[in-house]
Image (spheres, helix red, strand yellow):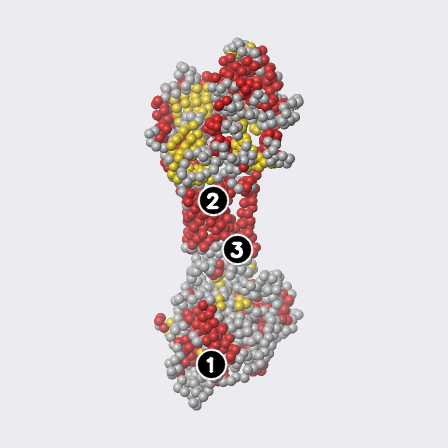
Amino acid sequence: MRLYIKHIGLVFYVFLVTCSLLSNAQTLQDPTTKTGTTDSYTTAVQGSTATPPETTSAQSTQSNVTTRNDVTTQSDATTQGDVTTKSRVVTTESRSTTKQTEITTKKGDGEDDHGYDSEEEEYIAEYEGYDGWYNNLAHPDWGGAEMALTRRVPPAYVDGVYYPSGADRPNPFDISDATMKGETGSGSLLKRTAFMTFFGQQVVEEILDAQRAGCPPEYFNIKIPSGHRYRKYIPLDEMPFLRSRYDMNTGFNPSVPREQLNEITPWIDGGLVYGTTKAWADALRSFKDGKLASNEDRGEPQFPSENIIGLPMANPPPPAESDQHTLRDVTRFFKLGNPRGDENPYLLSFGILWFRWHNYWADRIKREDTTGKMNDEMIFNEARKWVIGTYQKLVWYEWLPAFLNMDEAEMEENAYDGYKPYIHPQVSHIFQSAAMRFGHTLVVPGVARRDKDCDFFRTTKDSSFTPEKYNPIGRIGTRTCNSFWNPQLPIRETGMESYLMGMASQHCEREDNIILEDLRGNVFGRLDFSRRDLMAINIQRGRDHGLPDYNTARRAYGLKARKTFEEINPYCNNTQEAAIPCSILTENLANVYNGDINKVDIWPGGLLETTKNGPGELFRTVILDQFRRIRDGDRFWFENDVGGPFTKEEQEIIRNITIHDVLILATDINEGDIQKDPFHFYEGEKCYDEAVEAFNLTISEHELDNCTDPYTFDYFKGSEVSFVLTFLAAGVWAIGCVVLLYVLSRNRRKMINESRKAQRRKSRKSAKETTRLYSTREWCGDGQSERPIAVRLGPGKSITVLNDRGNKTYRTIDLAIHQKITLLVCPDQRRKMMTIVIEKEYDLVMKFDTEEERNAFISDIESFLTDPAIGVGRERREVHQAEMLRMANTKVQRQKTLERFFRVAFAQAFKLDVDPDDITEFKSEIAKDVLTCELTKQEFAEALSMKSDSVFVDQMFDLVDKDNSGTVSFREFLDIIVIFARGNPDDKLELMFNMYDVDHSGMLTREEFKKMLKSMMEVVSADLEPSQLEQVVQTMFSSAGFESKNELSLEDFNQLMGEHKEELSNASLQIQGQEAAPVQQETKTHAPRGTVIHRGNAPSRAKKTIIRAYANKGQGEGSGNKGGGVKGGIQRRQTRSVQIETVQAAYPKTDSEKVFGQLKRFIENERLKIFWLVLYTLVLAAVFAERAYYYSIEREFAGLRRIAGYGVTVTRGAASAMMFTFSSLLVTMCRNLITRLRETFLHRFIPFDSALAMHKIIALYALFFSVMHTIGHGINFYHIASQPPNDLTCLFRDFFHRSHVLPKFHYWCWQTITGFTGVLLVLLACVMYVFATQYARRNVFNLFWLTHNMYVIFYILMVLHGSGRLVQPPFFWFFFLGPAILFTLDKLVSISRKKAEIAVFKAELLPSDVTALTFKRPTSFEYKSGQWVRVACKTLGSGEYHPFTLTSAPHEDHLSLHIRAVGPWTTNIRHTYDPNTVREHPYPKLYIDGPYGEGHQDWYQFEVAVLVGGGIGVTPFASILKDIVNKASSNTRFPCKKVYFIWVTRTQKHYEWLCDIIREVEEKDTTDLVSTHIFITQFYQKFDLRTTMLYICERHFQKIANRSLFTGLQSTTHFGRPDLPSFFNSLQDEHPDVSKIGVFSCGPPGMTNGVESACVEMNKFDGAAFIHHFENF
């Protein structure tokens, strides 16, 4: 605000000063103000409108205070000095008689010492600005720099908006060749000189500059015709053509079509001398005496200062230097106001002329300032004003009449009649793209330099850098085509004056259609296309600007359209009026345009109108209109009487100054050295005869050196090595990370293996001689990984294959059934492999670490086999490794044979359809393998899913193996299966009887009966106390009336099992892969009241029979339990309403059904995860598609899209996808937030427990898009490094490089923040991803943890990567900001919680590899039952945290965890707290972080709560169960009245500790709050023979002990899976007054989904609402 007030105050002060000055000024009559506007097609209205001095002064003050920023120009008119400055009233008299001619100032009568008339009022004038703005006070932007060109003819864009016109017009090359090609060397018909021609070039560059290409670059290339000379030198199909810059506010619809920009002002305001910005002008000044800086420091005061500061002047490569293929430093040029002023020596000569003309005026003004009050700024501005005024006069009154051959009448007709503010001065498109290019036909192939004595200079080696093979030395003139962009060389050689005099002494080319080859094929170009056809460019430029056809342009200017080609030039073939033959029109032009005159482009059409006067009717009209508008709309025109810069006397002085005067006064040219009119050269004038003799007035291209040949250039040159090395290094880095991981992992495994080997050696030393252990690796087949094993010889006649630790048996080879063993030994490949071939079994292929170990094993096994106690024959053969592996019968092959064995056996036993594949194979040789296949005891046990040493397997195997061969043949196996398939209950009972009648006495003793029951219990890994087993047997014998019997006959056994024959009728022997045969029989079953009645097949009836038994288990014998009931004699209530049934699974029969079933179950189990994954993927795809669409469609013609094509589309889309994915990763790691949200209703819709899995998936997405982005940028960087430097300057505006510098790949990749950070990101990503693999986490977890914590550096680099703004403004923060804030806050919460170091005071190694840790509870540690913590062990690394659920309850003073050893860390934690390891030392301390929440804490809010736990998902309920009992026992008031806990597990063996907790709950639950049911699912189906026997045993034991036979708990034990719908239905009967029942499940998704389905089904009917809360593990 203070700044605005300051500016307002300044304006007001200036206004007061101006008013006070004006009050003493001469009163001027205010003309009538006439306002109006003109559109694009309205001719300027004649009349005079001026602004009063007061308005002018005030508004100009405002204009000078105002600044404007545009694309590349900044105007700061306030820095000119005084806002208004006194313009000295001077009178001059031009004297041309001698060299001492000066413009003098006369003093009038009464003039005071300051040079001003004391009696006359002073005249106040405003200095003109630089950027053209505020010239017109009503329309400040009219005539401003960087404004759009105006249209005087309608646009003809193909799409009406921006697409170039002329799509149906001929190739510009063809037009150029057909209409503009010809012999040069003919002089001007009107004696015009080269001086006039090149003066015209600098006039054009005073008012027009639309040559710069648009940004981003748009290519509108011109196809090179076949056979064109370019194809000989340049291997390209097109000549590059860049479309012009345009106003970004145009080109969006037909109402506002694209309008190209004029980068300078259209005013004749000295921009050629001073530039169009104040900054540029200041760069040219010496800031001493108002002069422009000269090159005096380098001994060249006659030239402008060299561009040592690096002004951004145009700097294309000099095409003559074809051998160097390089750019040259812009500092070689002279500093000029015109950025293109160094294009050629002729244009540079005029630039130096105006430089001297300014300094001449600065010297004169300073000399005439006798008071010394005029400072540098005042002198400079005053001199600039006079330079502009004289230049305006020379252009309008000398050059333009010569160019258009205007006579006095025409000059009078176009005389100046005052300033017209309603006229728009801007250059028109047709003027820029066609009309003013008429001068091209006048350009000469070269210019002869001469001295004052008419001696013409010959070229030397110092005249140019043209290679010698083009013969540049000794020529009469400097060749135009070879002088481009090295103009200072010939000028320094002979001086600027030699060029001015030479141009004035040489006729220009004839006014015709012929364009010399220097322009029509050899004009300068880019490095990759050094020579171009300027005429083709002219035509293409007109189309680029949307110019219509030739006839449309004529009509727009009120001219008559041409109907025939001959009418274009009525004077054709009239050599007196024109030099264009009619054949050019009627043949060449007509043919190239296929006879359609309405498709003729303006440039060739207008050019062919040319007469001896110069431009034809159309071009003449356009040019004259343009210069009139520039003059009449210029408030600072030197002739403007009202508010103009000069007084009438000063105007008269300027009118008297000629171009001859300027040459005499500003150069070393003397009077008489040059003709009075340098624009014409007539006979009799100075040096005429000499010019005729030297080159016949006009130089022919044959008299000059040849233009250098076109050449191309590969911009990628110099980037090859850095490009290859960079990406090679990145690949090597990635591979190196993998290799490093492998080496580190291998070293770690090697250390572990060495430790294990040492332990094994120690064990072998202490082992018996008959037991030998050998460490090796087993080859499992092609495509299978090797596994470490240990081979034990003995004890007895056996060879055992174990895991490398020796605590798990993989296989046992029973040598008792084998007569011979074959040993295959490999003699090659370092001699490490061997195979043990066993008949009727699969081979054991072993690979030892060393040959010595293998040889030792061979020696030992041979000794072992030949031992008399073993007595097995052996055969040893040597077989090459490849042959050995090919011959090997691996376990995979053996398994396929066994599968066929079982399929065929069951198909025949159950009369099932055989798979066609099996039938086919059955008829083949494979059938022999099936029929001759014999099962070993181990394979038989595996088929029954039992251990080979179990009693059941022993008895059954012995029974089946009728020939006592030690194996079961196909026929033997089929016989036993037929019994189960077709036999009646008596047959099955007889089979059971015979199995356990070991001595075949026909009697089954009590001990043998007990043995049978114990073998059944092995199925569920259940152990029984002898007293318990005795109780079961006694009960069963008593119930059958056999109390006194110690032996049972077959009849007795049938009587004992008689009441269970219904169950036995459906019993079978379940084999892996077997599918139960359907049973068609149906019976009616009556259930007690409250039992849900179903109708079904026999298996379901068997199931219901068992349920009925459980329904009555609370009655009868249960009341008489003795010591086996609840502690304290409490009998648990069993109701008839609450019932839990088990369900039978339906197994698919075909492979397709299996696949479909698996897919169906997967979708059902993972539907929430699938939904969110699909949703995330769709959002990610949308993020990718948005950027891809933007760069493919919206930016199709812009930026890198035009350079790299769809590569940019891919990389930009991938970049956005990367930003989104890497930002999303932070959300998945907000553990505290996820914990809180998990406790809300959102957990029903969002799988929060899958956050880690989602983290991994998103990371894989991020990796995918990172690789895509990196590879894409590799391609893009190639394209970038192969682009012209000007295009790169445009595309990457924030990356400055000098115009002579070609940025290479290593610059973009290693010297930009975007490239360098990108490289670092790639390297860091390689490290993080390689060490985040499962392999790394398993083997080098500490390195995984270390590298993963480098994410902070990674995100910092990502922010820096985008901030480089290489391609687009950074918007990573759009994606990153929200997740980063959430993650930071979440981290702060974790930090504030302060990870506690806790002492462990109790550690127990429980069965099933479970480690129980009890440790002190921190004082401030508050948690809820079921929550989890992250735990780290101090000795295993304080930074390696793992999550575990607390098994302690909130009311307990300690915390406890039960950790099962299933991975490296959990195994190490078990070893760490092993008493043998700890011994007398204290337990290692723990670090805990948490707690983190679960979703089960609302159990107490429901009157009835159901807790369902499955597998490891039961762990959270340990804490909850304790909490429940504590609340109940402490009389805590809470709504819950009954809790049902359902535990579903394959076997309770893995969770003995939970059984202990349940037992504790049962002991403390005096109010019968908790009812527990355990479901053991380690069975195939409910009617398996073994399952049926277990039901029978369990029922009897429950009756006598009131606790489970298998768990020792009072809780009911079931075999199978719970039928939850029937259970929920019975709950409604048991609790009719309850309106809501809370259901809390935790476990595998399949289980929780089943619970959810049951709840949904129950909620469809009236009754209690089942509210489900679940967690998945």
Which of the numbered marks, if any, corresponds to residue 1201?
Answer: 3
Along the viewing direction, whichever of 268 and 340 lies nearer the viewer: 268
- Answer yes or no: is residue 840 visible: no
Which of the numbered marks, if any, corresponds to residue 20?
Answer: 1
Which of the numbered marks, if any, corresponds to residue 1230?
Answer: 2
Q: Nearer the viewer, mark 3 or mark 2?
A: 2
As drawn, is 915 to the left or to the right of 1347? right
Residue drawn at x 48%, y 66% is 69
Along the viewing direction, whichever of 1405 and 126 lies nearer the viewer: 1405
Residue drawn at x 45%, y 18% is 815
What amino acid does circle 3 point to? Answer: Arg
Alpha carbon distance from label 2 to label 1:
73 Å
Give the quarter of the image for residue 1586: top right
Give the quarter of the image for residue 485: bottom left
Along the viewing direction, whichever of 518 and 309 lies nearer the viewer: 309
- Across and down, in percent, residue 560 comes to 65, 73
